[in-house]
Amino acid sequence: MKRIISRDNAHYRELKRLHASARERRRSGRLLLDGMHLITAYQQRCGRPAEIVLSDSGAGRAEVVDYLASCPSGMLITQLPDALWAELALVDTPSGIMAVAGWPQPAAVVDLAADTVALDGVQDPGNIGSILRSAAAAGFRQILLSADCAQAWSPKTLRAGMGAHFQLDIHEGGDLPAFLAAYRGQSVATAVNATADLYTAGPGAGAVTWVFGSEGQGLRAAVLAATHLQVRIPMPGACESLNVAAAAAICLFETVRRRQRAVDGGR
């Protein structure tokens, strides 16, 4: 086990860059996984992480001790004082364990006939993580993010996704209008438009791409124009719009409901 006690330590500075910098995560192809749940989810799908990082207080927790006992003898383990750990932690009650892991790679080619969730300019990491979690639960495996979305693999997005990332093919920096123009299923966008069809009119059978826009601006005109259908979610209350993660969950599980109803013979 390696112990670090100084903020000036080169390896500690490297961990801080992984925590803070999207550019460093992309350059190195590595992630920081905060907490036992994320580490376990990663390991089930992607194999062992490259390094385990512990806080002094976390090292004695029962679940951490049990996990370390299962690690191979050559596993790199780094332990930090709680004060240094706090500079990497995302929450006030830290987990006490993180992992440095390789960035999972999506399928080499985007599938033009797969159920897809496409995000255009969604900039809140928590919203992206929540959408990924709903997509995985609803059976949508392929995710496309435009270049101006928040990074899908940031620590905050990973935490909000609760392990869903590792069940998905996530393609960042996508050209959404080009994808939608070539898509062989039906693409559907939510719109704040009183004349649009209700979201329950969206497709059930066949491949579908649901397209969701930024929290403030919605979809870019070029993306909206490339979709086959625009639908609305009725809001009888006084709010102007729904949180994008809430809207995504409603629409994705409407597709699940319609498909299940077709399997059940319309019951």
Image: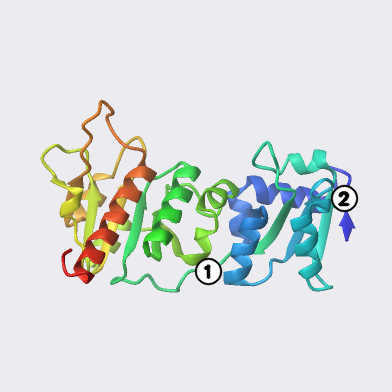
Q: Residue at x 40, y 73 (%)?
A: 109
Q: Residue at x 87, y 50 (%)?
A: 4
Amino acid beneath label 2 = Ile
Q: Where, quadrant-wise, is the C terminus in this rendering? A: bottom left
Q: Where, quadrant-wise, is the N terminus in this rendering? A: bottom right
Q: Is residue 209 visible?
A: yes
Q: Can residue 31 be seen in this view?
A: no
Residue 75 horizontal side relative to residue 145, left or right = right
Residue 1 vs 94, above or below: the answer is below
Q: Residue 105 carries which label?
A: 1
Residue 73 vs 144, above or below: the answer is below
Q: Residue 182 carries which label?
A: none
Amino acid beneath label 1 = Gln
Percent position (x, y) of residue 182? Answer: 24, 67
Element type at mark 2 = loop
Tell me the crowding category of disc 2: few under 14, some 14 to 19, or many 20 or more residues within 10 angstroms, Cα based: some
Q: Which residue lies furthest to the left in this view?
A: 195
Q: Label 2 vs label 1: CA separation?
A: 31 Å
Q: Of callouts 2 and 1, which one flags the residue occurring earlier in the amino acid sequence? A: 2
Q: Residue furthest top?
A: 238
Residues at badges 2 and 1 in contact (C-beta under 8 Å)? Answer: no
Percent position (x, y) of residue 90? Answer: 64, 42
Q: Residue 4 carries which label?
A: 2
Q: Residue at x 57, y 46 (%)?
A: 156
In depth, the one of 265 and 31 nearer the eye is 265
The image quadrant that residue 74 belongs to is bottom right
Element type at mark 1 = loop
In depth, the one of 10 and 89 nearer the eye is 89
Tell me the crowding category of disc 1: few under 14, some 14 to 19, or many 20 or more residues within 10 angstroms, Cα based: few
